[in-house]
Amino acid sequence: MIVDMYDAVIIGAGISGAAIANALARYQLRVAVFEKASDICGGASRSNSATVHSGHDATYGSLKAHYNVLGNAMYDKLCDDLSVPFSRNGMILFATSEADKNEIVRLKQNADQNGVPGVQVLNRASLLALEGSFGEEVIGGLYAPSSGQVCPYSLVIALCEHAAENGVSFFLNTAVLRLEKQGEGYLVHTARGSVQTRFVFNCAGVYADEINNMISGNHFHITPRKGEHLILDKKLAPYVKATISQTPLDLPSGGHTKGMGIMPSVDGTIILGCNSCDVVDKEDTATSEEGISQIIRFFEENWRHLPIHSAVPSFPRHLIISAFAGLRPHPDTDDFIIGEAADAPGFYNMAGIESPGLTAAPAIAQELANAFAQQHHIPVSEAYCPTRTYKKAFRNMTAEEREQALASDPNYGHIVCRCEQVTRADVLQAIHSPVGARTVNAVKMRTRAGMGRCQGGFCCPEVVELLSKELGIPMSEVTLNGAGSEVIPYEIGSFETV
Amino acid sequence: MKKECIDIAIIGGGCAGLSAALSAKQAGAARVVVFERAPELGGVLRQCIHNGFGIHRFGEDLTGTQYARHLVDQIRETDVQCLTSTIVLDLSAERVLTVMNEDGITEYSAKAVILATGCRERPRGALAIPGTRPAGIVNAGTAQRYLNLEGYLVGKRVVILGSGDIGLIMARQFVLEGAHVIAVAERLPYSSGLMRNIVQCLDDFDIPIYYRSTVTRIVGENRVEGVYLSEVDACNCPIPATERFIECDTLLLSVGLIPENELASQAGLALLPFTGGPAVDDSFQTGLDGIFCCGNALHVHDLVDFVSIESEIAGRMAAQYTLAPTHRDCEVVHVHDGPGVRGIVPQIIRRNAAEAQVTLQFRPDTRYGACYIEVYEGENRIVRAKRAVLTPGEMVEIKIPRAKIHADITVKVTTVFT
């Protein structure tokens, strides 16, 4: 299955793995990405607040601060090149007390030191002028205009697809079990066979410590830090413009997060969150009663401060459409762990990429790939194509574009997911794209089919049917997210009946 | 873009849409077009292979599929144009529809529009049940579709959350197909479904229903491995000490239906909190001229027969509107939910309309034994009807002579003390 020799093996296909794969694709290298899950972007990169942070709160002098600010600046071009939705909607931290205000002044100084552009401390009047009707108790705030919102999984998918188009090979369901030093390079033992490689890039998220500790004596530890979010219906989109967050001073959770915030996703839904809780199990993405209640309680109590309260007077609990939890890889060093392991030449870490990891990863990958290529004198690939082959989703097309698309492919004329206006053509593309969807959830991430109000009630049967047909497998073998998660495992007549 | 002018555009080819189309045609409407997104007409009736349909409307006990066949056969005898595999992408207040199918995108201008878009199931996300998100958490109606239209079962050890009618029907069908239905959990002290379904689908098959209970956690990485069931207290909060684990591979959700009114919203209609549909007058016309709404898009019904009956009125009224759009000028009064009443329909009554009687429908807010349904005009009671029992699972209907209505009225439920 896997060809036996690569120049570079990347372990993990989250934002870090995707970004480094995309950066290495520029060079004359044979690159493979091994992902243990049934799809790319299965971990922290999928389940977060989708915010491209400004860098106002990252500790001055840390790698987090450096790459946060660098990465943030890359986002316009990056998302433009890859046709990924991104909006620089700005972030406001609102203050309701003198203590909040002092914290905001401190954050402003920190932001200036970090080189974050345009951060301002606003009094109430300027805040109202900027964003409208904050509650009466809000006395001012911090405004970070460079903060933005991106669709994180669209970005990871685009980075991977673009890398694949430039020759990077992706292997799903391929967990790395063991690493072995061999000659100049490494032998990588996976669940699907072993391969040789000159270089290894460790982008394994919450498992990055285990991968590093297989080969390097410089051990570190990653703690899975759970963050829970709620999603609210798109009906509220007109009332949420900037990302708005509490001043992190009065965090209930002891400062592990940037504070509870309300984020307008680029798809129109509203994200609320998140809380923070260290867990043991690296697969524990279950939401909890306490966590969900904590978020609901926070927004019930603080709703009156937010501009949305003038249109929607109280927290609209009935508009919650989903809840999710993600595990952020928190390193015991409290900063990103980046670069070649001192005692393992050719083994590079991109580890502990917790928040603001989504923002920072493209910058980390670019610097790391450039330094790596220089270090090993790797020439740039002449075949490299800087733009991604991309077909616009039906739901984003103008009326004219829709008519054109439909004239060339009747599959655009059939809606599979009515809530998100996903057509059969969109689903077929997701299945046949360079790192194609193999599961219902993979189709969902690539097309949004099933992400709307009905949460897949209507479209899931049709997605199952299309996957079955296109992949040439029986309906009963189509899974939600990999082996063991078959959607309709039993054909009628499988059981003895009464 | 192609453009067409028609008399009545009916959005949705299920029971409501087809019933409205038939009566519109009978009432003399010229060009009637039904837009249905599925490849076949009939809506959710197509997957309802159980009986219990048609007793009120057709005087015989039919399966859902037979009921749909009845309607489709009748439609075929008319010149109503039914466009299947066709979706309405946009609807304007001026009754312009942007319609798409594999042949292209067409703009239809209609003299009248009937929203017959039905409803959808409330998904798990709306409940925010804590836990993982594995395979095996399925809405009852989706499971019904997999079973009756595709021929697949979603699991073999099933817990059902909620006692809506589809969940009860599926409990029975899962047992008949050889799966094990372990329990039904209902947060309320009574079922939100029909009494007959509790008896025929649960009691007759020895399936236990636990009232005042809910699922508090879902366990399982790839597939559901079990759920935690807890009793709830008077405030509907789970009581931690009562939490118990039930091993299962499927959690079926039957926790309510939500009218599907995205197009109504697009056109600018506000949706009411209890019904989830737009406000209508007793001709089923909404606040927008020439836009009518009926069936489960207007308010969720208990029986399909009543969807037919309501939609037939809407179809007739829409036809009249296309022939002489004048009746909007008449004087109207408003109907309000009083104590015990939720989501009364219609919300507006035309005082001088021709029909002698006005029919009001609503759901009671809880269960009642012997009680009165009373209609007040200010302090003045104009109608009172006695009922032996009311339950939120069943729609309540009351008729009022139009001549008795002069001003806004309020409908109440009052308990009979004996």
Image (cartoon, coloured by chain):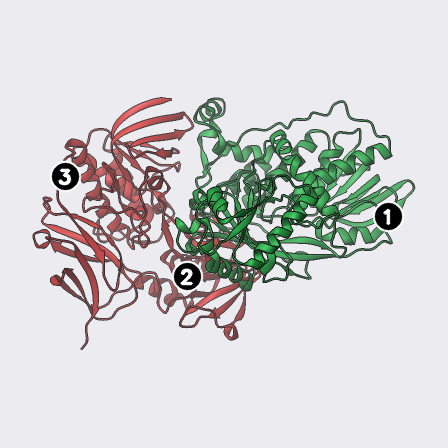
Chain colours: A green, B red
A117 or A8: nearer the viewer: A117
* Amino acid on which the number 2 mark rests in the picture: Gly
Q: Secondary structure at mark 3?
A: helix
Which residue position is annotated with label 2? B162
Locate the N terminus of chain B by quadrant.
top left
Locate the C terminus of chain B by quadrant.
bottom left
**Contact between labelled residues 2 and 3, with CB atoms less than 8 Å apart:** no
Q: Earlier in the sequence, mark 3 or mark 2?
A: 2
Q: Residues within 10 Å of mark 2 (few under 14, many from 20)?
A: many
Residue B329 is tagged as 3
Q: Residues within 10 Å of mark 3 (few under 14, many from 20)?
A: few
Q: Secondary structure at mark 1?
A: strand
> Can residue A493 be spotted in the picture?
no
Please tell me whether mark 3 or mark 1 is closer to you in this view: 3
* Amino acid on which the number 3 mark rests in the picture: Asp
Relative to A33, say whether B166 is above or below.
Answer: below
Q: Residue at x 69, y 32 (%)?
A: A164
* Amino acid on which the number 1 mark rests in the picture: Glu
- Tell me: B74 left or right of A441: left
- Tell me: B334 left or right of B265: left
The percent coordinates of residue A363 (x first, y second) are 71, 38
Which residue position is annotated with label 1? A180
